[in-house]
Image (spheres, grey):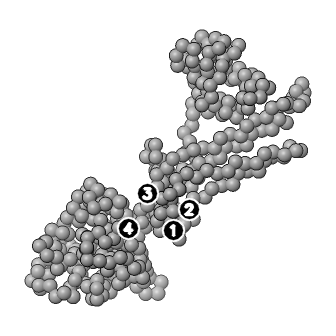
Amino acid sequence: MADAHLRTLIDLTYRHRFAADDGGRGGANLRHGKNGADIEIRLPIGTVIRNSATGETLADLVKPGQQVTLASGGRGGRGNAHYATPTRRTPRFAEKGEPGQKLKVRLELKLLADVGVIGLPNVGKSSLIAHVSAARPKIADYPFTTLVPNLGVVKIEEGVSFVIADMPGLVEGAHEGAGRGHQFLRHVERTRVLIHVIDIMAQDRDPLQDFRVINHELVMHDSDLATRPQLVALNKIDLRPDEDEVTRVESALESEGYRVFRISALTGEGLRRLVGEASTLLGALPAPIPEVEPAEAVAPRRPALRVEQVEPGLFAVSGEKVERLVIMTDLDNEDAVRYLHRQLDRMGVIRKLRALGAEDGDKVEIGSVRLDFVE
């Protein structure tokens, strides 16, 4: 279930296995046993759930309270009263409960933010978010201060606000995993507007080259990001950079169609205009949230019935119905085994085994159970 109060997958770091309890036993007077209780795993909004074995996307939790059933419990076994007949009034066997489904999944969190703040490390992304929202990210003067994305809410006026997040770890080669690029580039996919922060006071670096490096990494990760609206913020204007240099960068970017803002993430200069423009852009854009049909049943369907010889003296029988029949039979109960033999005969399994040359004493595997073939 998607929980709006969760922000990370940290709670699942040390717990990897979830198993629901068994149902209860049936009682006297033909009473059913109690159903087993569901296990609910709460995940942050923006979590993508994939089948570990196939890579198939099973669900994309994008709305608060959204639920998806990953694995279902098996039905309860039928009691001995079900097998009563006019000639077998008191059966001495009952059916075992069906095992529940098992599934291994991979969880990936893609933050749902309206505005993503991008740029090279240490250009002032965290300072910007700290100034325009109530978020309090770690801020320091060394690269990779931010090791997890920071989320904040920017309030423009009463009833008008948006979620902003910084995207750490973006360096040249990020799309290949450099600087933890794989961990953070996926978060950019969900943003509708990008604010590209450039350090206009960077020493021994060309701000325009910095800008193009980051944009190249975005496009290499996902070509659709090239069409995402992008505002450019020339940061650290409070340090009085060379006016000619600022004008050069500003003119070059504006000639390419970008809106450029001179800001100071430290003093707040120019930030009101910047977030106001971001809010205006958001008002004109739809939210690009992928719609993935949730999977209610993930177990693949088995073929109806297949009987084959694996090697001399060993045969394999497969099929959803026959495998369920065997696994729900109490093989320690002689009456139950006799009933199983009759059912296999009615289904044509015994006939097909004979046709393949099965003889007394040969082994027959049905699902995970190995039985002796007996005429």
Where does residue 207 sit, x and y in percent of width and height? 16, 73
Q: Is residue 244 left or right of residue 300?
A: left
Q: Amino acid at mark 2?
A: Arg
Judging by the rendered image, the residue that carries numbered circle 1 is 6
x and y, in percent, of residue 9 in the image: 47, 62
Q: Are marks 3 and 2 in contact (CB under 8 Å)?
A: no
Mark 4 vs mark 1: give the one in front: 4
Q: Residue furthest left?
A: 244
Q: Which mark is residue 42?
A: 2
- Mark 3 or 2, nearer chain start: 2
In the rendered image, residue 340, in percent from the top left (x then y), is placed at: 73, 26
Closer to viewer: mark 4 or mark 2: 4
Q: CA distance from mark 1 to mark 3?
A: 14 Å
The picture quadrant where one finds residue 243 is bottom left
At x 46%, y 46%, the residue is 52
User: Are circles 1 and 3 on residues that touch, CB within 8 Å?
Assistant: no
**In the current view of this chain or complex, which residue is farthest to the front?**
14
Name the residue rendered at 71%, 40% in the picture. 97
Q: Nearer the viewer, residue 216 or 281?
A: 216
Q: Earlier in the sequence, mark 3 or mark 4?
A: 3
Which residue, given by chain and number where applicable, does mark 4 sit on?
148
Instruction: Report the side of 239 relative to 35 (left or right).
Output: left
* Residue type at tag 3: Glu
| Helix, strand or loop under label 4 | loop
- Relative to 3, is 374 on the left or the right? right
Mark 3 sits on what residue?
108
Q: Crowding near pointer 2: few (<14 within 10 Å), some, many (20+)?
A: some
**Distance between the Cα atoms at labels 4 and 1?**
14 Å
In the picture, residue 219 is in which quadrant? bottom left
Picture quarter with the C terminus: top right
Circle nearer the N terminus (4, 1)? 1
